[in-house]
Amino acid sequence: MKIKFAPFMAALTAAALFTTTACSSDTGTENQSDPTEKVELTYWTWAPNMDKVTAAWNAKNPNIQVTVNKQDGGDPAVTKLLTAIKAGSGAPDIMQAEYQKIPTLVSSDAIADIAAEVGPVKDKFPAGIWNGVTLGSEAVYGVPQDSGPLMFFYRSDVFEANGLPAPKTWDDYAAAAEKIHKANPKQYLGTFSANDAGLFTGLAQQAGASWWGVNGDSWTVDINDAATQKVAAYWGGLVEKGVIDNKPMYTPEWNAALNDGTQVGWVSAVWAPGVLDGSAKDTKGKWKAATMPQWDAASPATGAWGGSATSVTTQTKHKKQAAQFVSWLNSDPEALKLLATESFVYPAANDSTSVLTSPPAFFADQPDFYTIAADASKAMKPFTYGPNVNVAYSAFNDAFAKAAEAKKATAFTESLATMQKTTVDDLKNAGFNVTG
């Protein structure tokens, strides 16, 4: 199935607006070169030391040479690519793209469907992660590169002092949060950060939500669904009860709380050790990693916070060769090891555990760290992003900030209706077909 969308105008940043007409993302195939000729490919990425990774490819593939062009990540990367696509020149052959940005790039006809070229590597990735490059369709708009499966991190000394095991379910988590805070009113097991929409999205994903969907040539939006309502009510209830904090993350106050022992747990992703190493140095050796608390312990599931794929742009003249490199980069054992050791990412492929043989330094005494992470990756629920994630996330920040200030569980669930309406209205105003 090819996904086609009506002409639209999508806001990527406050200063950048583009009007584009999307088609079926096959423009790069019309001018394909002879696959046996020597070609040079340009790769835009923000991952560190990617030139060291590509050097391994270049040494073995003299006819397909890849040059890395370091870029900023996030919205600036998307804006720059769409500017080049609109101009008709200057776009790279290969582009690193966050999963949440892929729908915008597809709708802008910026990245190509490479299903025919990379289909054989599909089985090398967890199904929930592969879903992130498909938009729920048969088309494939990249190969997963890195992933951020959600995990739970906690101060094992505090849990032991309170006679608590690591929580297996969200009921366990709530009980532990209450017991820890009652024993020491200065301590909190977690915080609900109302300005971190990415984490909340992952929590909803774990519960079974998928906020956008594709129905023929239309989008569907289901942010205010039962799964997300359950998640909002749960965290809103903990905030209202006062057993977890609701300070924003990544602030000096939050960093200090991690380090001084007043923040003793964190629902985060596989990349959390790096943050803890920087923010909670004095507590090294006291933290443990565990699987996420579950809604249903008999059916393990998790969500994601972060991650990106490697896509082929529609302006490349060497789609087949670019797809070859993209497949190697994200599935070959040598490449996976380089991604982990040189670019410091958690590879999305199933084989990541074979190259990550030592735990992160902050968790040096937990040799099963990456086994836990791999299990989380395999349990990731499918989730489809839409072309206006930035609008939905902005609506989250506004609505949930007010709910967090009110500290009422009902305010949290009511915020979802605001997010739903804002997201649907924006899609319609941008010229998209929206059904349901």
Image (cartoon, rainbow, N blue to C red):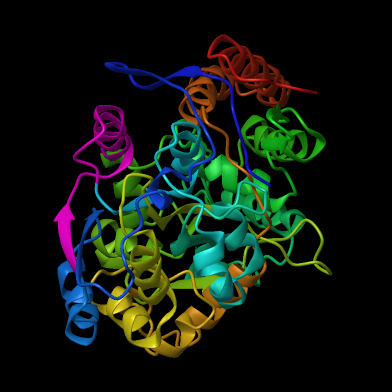
Determine if residue 160 is in view.
no
The answer to whether residue 81 of the structure is visible from this angle is yes
The image quarter containing residue 421 is top right
For residue 324, which quarter of the picture? bottom left
Above-or-below relation of 367 to 235: below
Q: Position of residue 125 (x, y in %)?
A: 57, 72
Q: Quadrant of the C terminus?
A: top right
The picture places residue 96, in percent across and down from the top left corner, at: 33, 53
Residue interval drawn in magenta: 66-91
Q: At 28% across and 69% down in the image, what residue appears?
A: 344
Comparing 242 with 367, the one in front is 367
| Residue for point 74% across, 67% down | 300
Residue nearest the viewer, comparing 225 with 139: 139
Look at the image and say whether residue 71 sits in the magenta stretch. yes
Q: Does the magenta-highlighted stretch encompass residue 304?
A: no
Q: Nearer the viewer, residue 286 or 319?
A: 319
Query: Would you place residue 221 above or below residue 210 in this image?
Result: above
Foreground residue among 411 and 12:
12
Residue 372 position in % (x across, y down): 56, 77
Drawn side of residue 269 relative to residue 159, left or right: left
Q: Quadrant of residue 63?
A: bottom left
Q: Vertical placement of 8 versus 273: above or below?
A: above
Give the residue at x 28% y 53%: 93
